[in-house]
Image: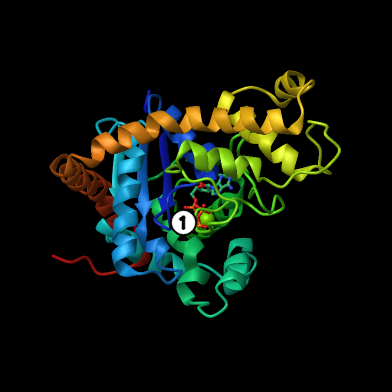
Amino acid sequence: MERKIVYSAIQASGIPSLGNYLGALKNWSKMQDNYDCIFSVADLHSLTVRREPALLKKISRNMFLLLLAMGLDPQKNIIYFQSHVHEHCTLAWILNCCTYMGELNRMTQFKDKSQKHSDNINAGLFTYPVLMAADILLYDADFVPIGADQKQHIEICRDIAQRFNKIYGDTFKLPEPIINKNGARIMNLQQPDKKMSKSETSGTIFLFDEPNEIMNKVKRAVTDSDNKIIYSQDKPGISNLLNIYCSAKNISIEQAQNFFADKNYGQFKTIVAQAIIELIDPIQKKYKELAQNKDYIDKLIKIGMEKASNIAYKKLDKVKRKVGLVKHL
Ligand code: ATP
Ligand code: MG
C-alpha cells in the first residue's frame, strides 16, 4: 500500500521553543517511520517580520541542524529550506489569484502579528497563509502535524485547494491537520493567556536554554495563590505547567493530577522543570555534535533541496498546464 504523505514546516524566526517542540516537532519524529515525510525550514515565511539578514541566516541553519538533532533521519525524510525550491513562490502566486481578501482578513495570526508589528504590516504578512497552502499542496500532503494555532491556516488551505479543483479540475489533495491532544497549545509562562512563541523572549523556554535557566523560568512562571494543582480554566498558569508535564512525560492530565495531589507549588514547579530539562538534554547534546560537522550538513542541505525540487517541479508543471500557462520548451 502507498504510504501517506506528511508535510510540515517551521519558521526560521528564532530558537525553537518548548511550544514548538511539544506542539509540532515531537510529532514529526514520531511520524517518520510510518509516513513519507517532508519537513522544511520556512525561511521565506520568516521574511514577513523584519529581521537582521546575518541573524536570519544563522537562525535558519541552526533550525536545520536542530531538526536533525531531535531525531529526524535525513535518509527517511526530505528536510530542506523553503527558499531553495522556487516552485513554492510560483504556486503561491497562482493560489493568490484564487484567494479572497475577505478570507485572509479573518486570519487570527494576521490580526495578532499586525498588532505586534504595527510599523510593518506588509503584504507578505497578509498572504502568509497562501504561501503556506502552496507549501503543503505542492507535495500532495495527506497530513500536516501542527500546533492548534495553525488550524485556521489548514482550513483556508483546504478552501483554496477545493476552489482551485472546482475551477480547473481535480489537482490538489485536501490535507488534514494533525493536532496533539496534550501540548497543542503551550502558553507563555509569564502571560498564560497568550501562546508561547519563539519570536518572543519573555515567558518562553527555548530548546537551547541551560538547565538552570529552565529551572528559573519555570520557578518564575505566573500561577495563583490557592495551592491546588488541578487543571482548570480558572487556573491558566497551573494548567499550562500540567499540560507541559503531561506532554513531556506522555501521561494523561488525570495521572499528573494524582501524582501532584500531595505536592505544593514549589515542589510541582521543580518537578516540571526537571521533566523539561530531561526532555531537552539529548537534543542539545546531539546538536553540539552535529554543529562540528559543517561539510556533512552542507551535503544534507543540498540533498534535501534536490529531493524536494523533484516533487515540486512536477506538481507545479501540472498546475501551470491546468491554468493555461504556455509550456516552456
Ligand atoms: P513565530 O512567533 O515566529 O510565529 P512560533 O513559535 O509561532 O514562531 P512557528 O514557526 O510559527 O513558531 O510554528 C511552528 C510550529 O509550532 C507550528 O506547527 C505551530 O502550530 C507550532 N506552535 C507554535 N507555537 C506553539 C505553542 N505555543 N504550542 C504548541 N504548538 C505551537
Ligand atoms: Mg507562529
Q: In the rendered image of this protein, does residue 256 appear above or below residue 36? A: above
Q: Position of residue 213 (x, y in %)?
A: 51, 43
Q: Is residue 321 visible in this depiction of the protein?
A: no
Residue at x-position 61% and y-position 46%:
148
Residue at x 63%, y 50% (from the top left corner):
188
Is residue 184 depicted above or below 247 in this figure?
below
Q: Quadrant of residue 68?
A: top left
Residue 266 versus residue 102: which sits nearer the camera? 266
For residue 140, side relative to residue 327 (left or right) = right
Q: Percent from the top left, x then y, of residue 254?
A: 75, 22
Image quadrant holding the N terminus, namely top left
Residue tagged by mark 1? 133
Residue 238 drawn above or below residue 135: above
Q: Is there any visible trace of residue 121 in the rendered image?
A: yes
Which one is in front, 101 or 170?
Answer: 101
* x then y, percent, for residue 141: 42, 42
